[in-house]
Image (cartoon, rainbow, N blue to C red):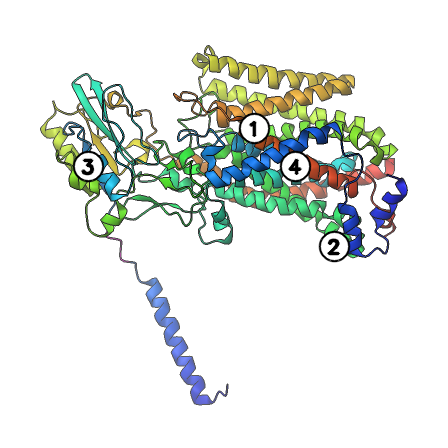
């Protein structure tokens, strides 16, 4: 695809809007890429499984039991997915609140990533609802269960999606060539950012608070009254590791869209982020140690679950933390990327340990997800990546805004 | 509408009277509800394990007949088709039985967890499920320390099943089916206050027959179902490590912090933004 086409598309000069949209919805680029070949069958299979799930009930597709009512779709898709989407609030905090301009070039892609993560992981929540037609009940106000942490989380998901959409909307306006709309929408950014950070603080911790009442069901090494704070602090480095990881992939896949200045500044951004990750992980580890010692949990260490806990803490918190510290001092970009992947695995482990692995660890029949639950989860992730790719290829997310933006 | 002087005064006086009256009605003290929490006292020493409670429960609630019979070593569980089960245990004082069902907590975890108020603690004390509100998220099941709510995993229109203390029968002035039909008088229906008195009386009158513990008096903040036993409750498969505080207390601290953060955060964030504005200027000068 030529650059000429791009210039036309991005300014939308004088084209009737419908014809412009029609041309934008056409697929572009090579179709039979390895990613497409893998993702398309899985997405179709996932769709079939979702139909079976709504037709025959949750039991036809999942291994959920009466003792373990929340499995992979909540523990991984929602709880872990939202932690990874935390990068958006951390970055908007740094750029719009702390006024660190250095990170401005990656705000849009991070917010887009966060927004899509919320849309799809909240969507995954719908798959898990037994009676999804009643999902509007807590929203329209005919039955407000205000004493419920889940009520808070549901509202925050909804409001935060709106806030993120507002944060991202100038890019949509630029894509459509809507100059007036862009002006209005970008004027709303700060309000959306402040609202969004407040919401994120509360629902990142709220996802942990969901499990506070399951006091007797979660393994004592993972249950404590500080789960909400743990979830909040770990969402900082979970989100930033995702930003580092996603950035290193985007820089390769969409390299034609990024101008030279941004390519050059990228290493500086990655190093800055790794510093923040290292500090946040240190705070997190310190909290974990405090809780461990105050809870007098020593006798639990010499058990299989205890070794598992040590592996999580040492192998997936202390190790990547040290890597982050070491590599930002020595400017080792490659090592930072390795550390971010280890951190992400660690966050997945931690969230699953609270929600699935450590949940009813003593039950006679353990919950192990079916292959179908895995396929649906993969299908959700792949669909999100497809939409992500579609947006990045069309809207000014990584590439510069059209020239008229700066003329104003 | 044409308003003359007379009409104006008429309207004025009527409105005034209505306002005054209305206020008076609002200010009047509400008559305190005379309804007390009901409950059921289960006396394990009287239970003979005949399963009449199970079968009368199934009949009343149009559920399948009971599965299996109580036998020591076999732990039967309530599920989406059986709201109550009786199990047998080999205890230090010989074979004993224990009936399991929803405990109808005073402050239930499930109702605090429910974001649509589908799980509902009635003023009569029964905890009921209201399908027209429920969205099937199963957070009640995650939260319940007794694992009482059960979900129909194999239905496209799934329900949450659990004991409702026969709420519809209570509203008709009848006794719950299990308590009504128990041939051994092991189940006694009444107000929770009276049941605790009765349980104490039985313990005091027969100190050798009972352990000095009413299960459910304090467990999980107190429950509507109360238990008496001849042996310590661990031997009957009860969880005795439940906290005496109610379970919703566990997430109260978090929920109380929410309004504080909602008010403080935006103000703090705006403050930081103003304080760091100079950074931006400096950056631009460098560039």
Q: Residue furthest top?
A: A302
Residues in magenta, as a range: B31-35
CA gap between label 1 and label 4 equals: 14 Å
Whichever of labels 1 and 4 marks the residue nearer the N terminus, that label is: 1
Q: Is residue B91 magenta?
A: no
Q: Secondary structure at mark 3?
A: helix
Image location (x, y in percent) of residue A332: 77, 18
User: B225 or B214: nearer the eye?
Assistant: B225
Residue A374 is marked as: 1
Is there a contact, CB below 8 Å, between mark 3 and mark 1?
Answer: no
Can residue A282 be seen?
no
The crowding category of the residue bearing disc 2, from other C-alpha atoms within 10 Å (few below 14, some 14 to 19, many at least 20), is few
Do callouts 4 and 2 mark residues in contact (Cβ within 8 Å)? no
Secondary structure under the numbered disc 2 in the rendered image: helix
Residue at left 49%, top 45%? A132
Q: Chain under label 1?
A: A
Q: Which residue is mark 2?
A: A184
Residue B127 picture quarter? top left
Q: Earlier in the sequence, mark 4 or mark 2?
A: 2
Q: Disc 4 sits on a residue from what chain?
A: A
Q: Quadrant of the N terminus of chain A?
A: top right
Q: CA distance from mark 3 to mark 1?
A: 50 Å
The chain that hosts pointer 3 is: B
Q: Spatial distance from mark 2 to mark 1, Cα to Cα? A: 42 Å
Residue highlighted by disc 4: A383
């Amino acid at each position: 695809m030529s650059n000429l086409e791009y210039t036309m598309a991005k300014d939308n000069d004088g084209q009737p809007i419908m014809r412009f949209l029609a041309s934008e919805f056409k697929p572009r680029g090579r179709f039979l890429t390895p990613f497409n070949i893998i993702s398309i069958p899985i997405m179709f299979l996932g769709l079939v499984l979702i139909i079976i799930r709504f037709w025959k009930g949750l039991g036809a597709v999942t291994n959920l039991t009466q003792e373990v009512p929340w499995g992979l779709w909540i523990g991984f898709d929602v709880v872990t997915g939202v932690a990874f989407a935390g990068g958006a609030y951390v970055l908007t905090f740094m750029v719009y609140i702390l006024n660190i301009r250095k990170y401005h070039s990656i705000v849009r892609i991070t917010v887009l990533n966060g927004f899509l993560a919320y849309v799809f992981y909240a969507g995954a929540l719908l798959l898990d609802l037994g009676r999804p037609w009643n999902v509007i009940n807590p929203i329209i106000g005919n039955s407000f269960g205000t004493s419920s942490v889940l009520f808070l989380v549901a509202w925050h998901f909804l409001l935060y999606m709106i806030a993120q959409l507002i944060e991202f909307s100038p890019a949509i306006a630029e894509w459509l060539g809507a100059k007036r709309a862009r002006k209005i929408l970008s004027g709303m950014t700060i309000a959306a950012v402040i609202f969004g950070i407040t919401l994120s603080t509360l629902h990142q911790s709220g996802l942990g608070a969901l499990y506070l009442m399951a006091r007797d069901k979660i393994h004592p090494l993972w249950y404590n009254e500080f789960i909400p704070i743990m979830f909040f602090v770990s969402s900082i480095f979970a989100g930033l590791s995702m930003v580092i990881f996603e950035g290193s992939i985007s820089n390769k896949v969409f390299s034609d869209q990024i101008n030279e200045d941004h390519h050059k500044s990228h290493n500086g951004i990655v190093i800055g982020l790794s510093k923040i990750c290292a500090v946040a992980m240190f705070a997190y580890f310190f909290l974990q140690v405090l809780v461990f010692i105050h809870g007098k949990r020593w006798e639990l260490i010499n058990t299989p679950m205890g070794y598992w806990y040590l592996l999580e803490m040492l192998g997936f918190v202390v190790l990547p933390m040290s890597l982050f510290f070491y590599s930002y001092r020595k400017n080792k970009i490659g090592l930072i990327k390795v550390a971010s992947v280890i951190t992400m695995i660690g966050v997945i482990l931690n969230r699953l340990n609270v929600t699935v692995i450590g949940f009813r660890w003593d039950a006679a029949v353990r919950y192990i997800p079916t292959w179908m639950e895995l396929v649906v989860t993969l299908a959700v992730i792949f669909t999100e990546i497809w939409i992500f790719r579609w947006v990045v290829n069309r809207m000014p997310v990584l590439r510069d805004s059209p020239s008229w933006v700066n003329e104003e | 509408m044409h308003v003359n002087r007379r009409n104006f005064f008429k309207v004025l006086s009527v409105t005034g009277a209505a306002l005054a009256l209305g206020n008076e009605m609002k200010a009047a003290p509400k008559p305190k509800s005379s309804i007390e929490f009901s409950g059921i006292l289960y006396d394990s020493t009287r239970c003979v394990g005949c399963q009449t409670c199970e079968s009368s429960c199934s009949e009343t609630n149009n559920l399948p007949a009971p599965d299996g019979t109580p036998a020591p070593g076999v732990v039967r569980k309530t599920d989406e088709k059986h709201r109550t089960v009786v199990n047998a245990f080999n205890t230090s004082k010989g074979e004993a039985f224990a009936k399991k069902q929803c405990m109808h907590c005073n402050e239930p975890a499930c109702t605090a967890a429910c974001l649509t108020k589908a799980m509902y603690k009635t003023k009569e004390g029964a905890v009921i499920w209201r399908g027209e509100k429920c969205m099937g998220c199963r957070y009640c099941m995650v939260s319940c320390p007794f694992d009482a709510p059960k979900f129909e995993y194999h239905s496209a229109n799934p329900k949450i099943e659990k004991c409702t203390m026969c709420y519809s029968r209570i509203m008709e002035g009848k006794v719950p089916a299990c308590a009504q039909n128990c041939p051994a008088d092991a189940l006694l229906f009444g107000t929770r206050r009276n049941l605790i008195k009765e349980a104490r009386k039985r313990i005091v009158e027969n100190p050798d027959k009972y352990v000095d513990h009413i299960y459910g008096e304090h467990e999980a903040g107190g429950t509507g179902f109360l238990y008496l036993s001849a042996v310590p409750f661990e031997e009957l498969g009860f969880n005795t490590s439940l906290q005496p505080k109610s379970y919703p207390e566990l997430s109260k601290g978090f929920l109380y912090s929410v309004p504080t953060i909602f008010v403080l955060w935006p103000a703090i964030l705006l403050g930081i933004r103003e304080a760091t504005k100079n950074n931006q200027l400096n950056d631009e000068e460098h560039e």
